[in-house]
Amino acid sequence: MSAPIELIESNDPVAVPWRVALMRRDSRPAVRESDEKYVMTFPHLIVREIIMFQLVVIGLSLAAIFFDAPLESIANPVETPNPAKAPWYFLGLQELLHYFPPVVAGVLMPALVVIGLVVIPYARVNLEAGPLWATHSRGKLASLTLVVLALSLLFGAFSCWPIVIPTLIIGAAMLAARNGEQASPWRRALWRVTLPEWIMTWFVVIAALLTIIGVFFRGPGWSWVWPWEQFRA
Amino acid sequence: MTTGEWIRGTSVYRSVIRHGLEDTNRNRSLIIFENLFLHVHPVKVRERSLRFTHTFWLGGITLASMLVLIATGILLMFYYHPSVPQAYRDMKELQYVVDDGVFLRNLHRWAAHLMVFTAVLHMLRVFYHRAYRPPRQFNWVIGVVLLLVTLLLSYTGYLLPWDQLAFWGVSVGTNMAKQAPLIGERIRFFLLGGNIVSENALLRFYVLHCVVLPVALLLLVSIHIWRVRKDGGVQGPPEEGRQ
Amino acid sequence: MPLRRLFALSSLAFLAVLAVSPVKNALRPYRSIQAQYKALGLARATSMKAASVYADRQIAIQQIWIPKFDNRVDRCTTCHLGVSDTVMAGAPEPFRMHVATYHTPGDFPRFGCTACHAGEGLATSKDDAHGTSPDSSAPMRPAAYMESGCGRCHQSETVDEAPTLSYGRATMAKAGCYACHAVRGHEDFRSDAPPFVSIASKTGGAWVEQWLADPKKVDPNATMPNFQLSKDDITELANYLFSLPVPPQLEQAVEQASAEPAGNSANGKVLFRESMCITCHTVDGKGNGSAPELNHIATRATRGWLIAFIRNPHAFNPKTKMPQYSFSDQDVRDLVAYFEDELRDFDAPKEILDPLRVNQTLADKGHELFKNYGCFSCHVGTERGGERFGPDLDGIGDRRASSLDFGKRTDLPHTLDAWLAAKISAPRSFADGLKMPKFSFDPEQRRAIVTALLSMSSAPVPEPYRYIPPQQASVVPAGQVGEIVDRYRCLSCHQFGSRGGDISTAPLTFEGSKVNRDWLVSYLMLPTSIRPLLPERMPIMKISKPEAEKLADAIETFYVDPSIPENPFAGRPAADADPKEGERLYTTLGCRSCHIIGSSGGYYGPPLTDTHTRLKPGWVYSYLMNPQKWRADIRCPNYGLTDTDALRLTAYLETLVAAPAAPTATAEQRSAR
């Protein structure tokens, strides 16, 4: 006794909870089996989050117990400290002011950085994310070399060595990585780096370097001092 | 029947907490999705995402320092007058008289530095993990704005103690803003409420620091986190062979 | 499960870390200090009632809040609990009772503590409150400079009960600090340094070079500091000074004088003594020292210049304190002859007074140096900008030690007072190329100046706390009398109201109520010694009778105190004017230990032999009632006499009349001294 198969067409999943999928031979979707292990959010993630929060508070509290926040004498517009420093996260900018005209260092460069950050996810080169040297051509090598040298010369013209030196080092590393595909794992890792990653690394190294110089190596009149040299305003 | 059992039996308790105590997957799920704050999480998460190296917890640390900042900031507001010279004097009073005053101020200060620092690191982590790719594109942009808001918060708070460090730090910073062509002077005047760092600037920075920017930050952070959830949870390092 | 254990551990650490700050609060040092005070008070209290005050004490922060005084809050008394507690007299710090001063203990609520002592009044721990770190914006005043605290409110030059501060302010004015440094209240300061107009006719190039190398070495009374100039600098400056043109009428006067015949040295010597030049000048260190040393005067200036100058000093230097003596032409020649015979440096080279042959290139360089070192700040007349040459000193007392440039002086402690003391004793030791000259202050002067500098605040204290003693009117009449006062430079020694010098102990502000006109006329013409103990005397300036009368009339008219009665005996019973009773009082009070009557008595006060001739009875009476009324530093004790006793004593003194003395005899007596 077998009843004939009854076909019902419907869009209502409650009334008709069965589905048959038909697919053509040439349009087979790649269905990947996922062996990912899932765990319950509570307690696994929540407890970890609480521990993380507690560790942050413990760390901050220890800092707060042992190191007092700075407080100098009352603001006095007449008594200019030398050097007058901005908070640390702006000291990279202030360091730039030492090399470039104010409009460039104070407006143009920060604006470029912000615009650069915003467009990252919309740039095709970022989305493709292939290793820089996955495609290899003479033109690419030449143009990249040219860019590195041009940037070095440009910043060298302002004698901004904290930019020129990282540019040359990272530029050299980038160019040297081009034949690293089959080499040692270390060089292979460099080979896999994408162009945006090279640029970001270059930017981060420079920003960190400028900030560190601004914080620790600048004294009266924005002159170079060593951190261990005691200077008084 | 113990007191605990009695309490859990009352209708008031059950109207507040709507799940049982037994350690069952049902109750574990209810904990998450019956709670406004926890329901940004899915009920189950990939085990891999719990690994430290998955995100280095950088966003979490940033959020944690933000919570510390809000808590200490509100307490500090009880002792602070945005006026000259009382603002500076209030710093001294915190130090000398207010119970835990120094601790609160130190905590607020160091948490602020930590937040700026981890926010930057978080951004770098996201970049190198390529977590900005679709569908997370716009969340990256929100993140950049959040970083700017964080910097502004830290910077506006920098002036509030009204000491030499604050005064000259802000003077140097706003002089940079002055360099912008055409509108530079106007921006500076708008920021400071005058041509020099004065009591007007203190009041403006205070309102920005305690009202405008925190509200903006909370809104943006909410969107940022909500979008993380909507886009499939935290994105760790790119997986091998899957581009 | 390790995660749970980790959670437990981190939760415990979390709570522990958050408990640290409240525990620290509970253990603040002032709490145990207050407990100690309680115990000490209970041990020292002599009555149950006093003890109960200590027993009932609550542990709490104490403060003095003065809204009107910069909203000052001083919590010093949180630890210094015994400042106004007599039980704590001589107790160990921090509980010791405050020593009694003019303002304490009565004015604690008005001034608090930091108004005088500085320090951080808001603080509740020792290091913070005392401001021991160099970054402290309010370090406490060191004990050595305590009087600088007085100077914050007391802004007058002299502050009673603050001798160091007053000395410091006086020394700063005398050293001419305000000529280079702008200081609030001294905007009109002008140095006494002479202009250079006549230098080429006065002295020689060699002498000027000696002087520039070290003024104090040439003249210990010199107020000019040592600019520590190199040999080349000195030559260039000397060339510049000699290149300045001498005004023709002065040059002519000097030339004419040098052509005059020589005077009589012996007569000059007598005249020199009689004229009491050492009331201002010194000879071999003997004398007052407020004017140049005269032992080498003839090596210092040419004969012609000396004669011309003594005849009319005000033409050469309009600001000089030297009176214009009414000497005859012969008198001046005699005087200068005496200088040339005896008051000269016999070891000096012959050519010391030879004029310098000016090299214009060197003179131009010298001119640059002159400007570069700010010489024009004191030697006015050549060039001078609107601004002061040196940095402003306002607010110097509020500078933080960490904002000071210690430069090469790594030997100094990082405190403001150490920096200031080093700055005024060796100004150029901090860095190369500094311009401030070296003054030769002794340690006491240095301490006084640092005290005065520390009293200079960046912002003045609020109006109700500013204390400036009432200024006495200091009118100097214009016209003929004014000319006489100017000619004899009365103000160089005497005070009219708040103006004038302090060489004389007799201010002239109320002189008209004090002395009889006729006595004054004869005194002006031929002054006699009034207080034998003092080396300074009124010089005999040969004032003519009409001049003396005009001056005496003016003093009689203008310089009177209306509170002094013309006739104190008016309306009193005759018994009050009984000289016998007065004489008895004179003996019992011991007046004779200081005053001479007849042939016996002390030398401290003026002789009273001629009281009736010299003093008005109203003055004598008012003076006896309160000797310190007109000058706080008068040593005559205030005996608290009753009206009647004062009147009787006055009546006695009024019986004393001077025998008319032959003027020549007095002059001889004086020259014999």
Image (cartoon, coloured by chain):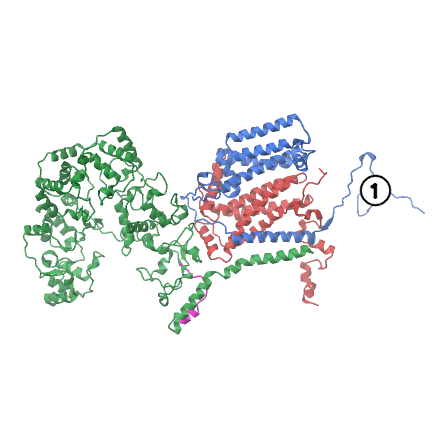
Chain colours: A blue, B red, C green
Classed neighbour count for the residue bearing mark 1: other residues with Cα under 10 Å, few (<14), some (14–19), many (≥20): few
Q: Residue at x 34, y 42 (%)?
A: C428
Helix, strand or loop for disc 1: loop
Q: Position of residue A146 (x, y in %)?
A: 59, 27
Q: Residue at x 18, y 56 (%)?
A: C562
Q: Residue furthest front?
A: C347
In this view, B65 is above or below A121? below
> Residue flagged by tag 1: what amino acid is it?
Val
In this view, B34 is above or below C334? below
Chain letter of disc 1?
Answer: A
Relative depth, front residue between C476 and C155: C155
Does residue B83 appear left or right of residue B40 in this picture?
left
The stretch drawn in magenta includes residue C57: yes
The stretch drawn in magenta includes residue C532: no
Range shown magenta: C51-64
Relative depth, front residue between C157 and A61: A61
Name the residue that disc number 1 marks.
A20
Q: Position of residue A153 (x, y in %)?
A: 54, 29
Q: Residue at x 30, y 49 (%)?
A: C446
Relative depth, front residue between B163 and C301: C301
Does residue A106 appear left or right of residue A8 in this picture?
left
| Visible residue check, residue C402 | yes
Q: Position of residue A31 (x, y in %)?
A: 78, 40
Label count reads: 1
| Visible residue check, residue C53 | no
Q: Residue furthest bottom?
A: C48
In the picture, residue C372 is in which quadrant?
A: top left
Q: Residue at x 14, y 55 (%)?
A: C532
The quarter of the rendered structure image containing the N terminus of chain C is bottom right
In this view, B57 is above or below C635? above
Q: Position of residue C571 (x, y in %)?
A: 13, 64
In this view, A60 is above or below C264? below
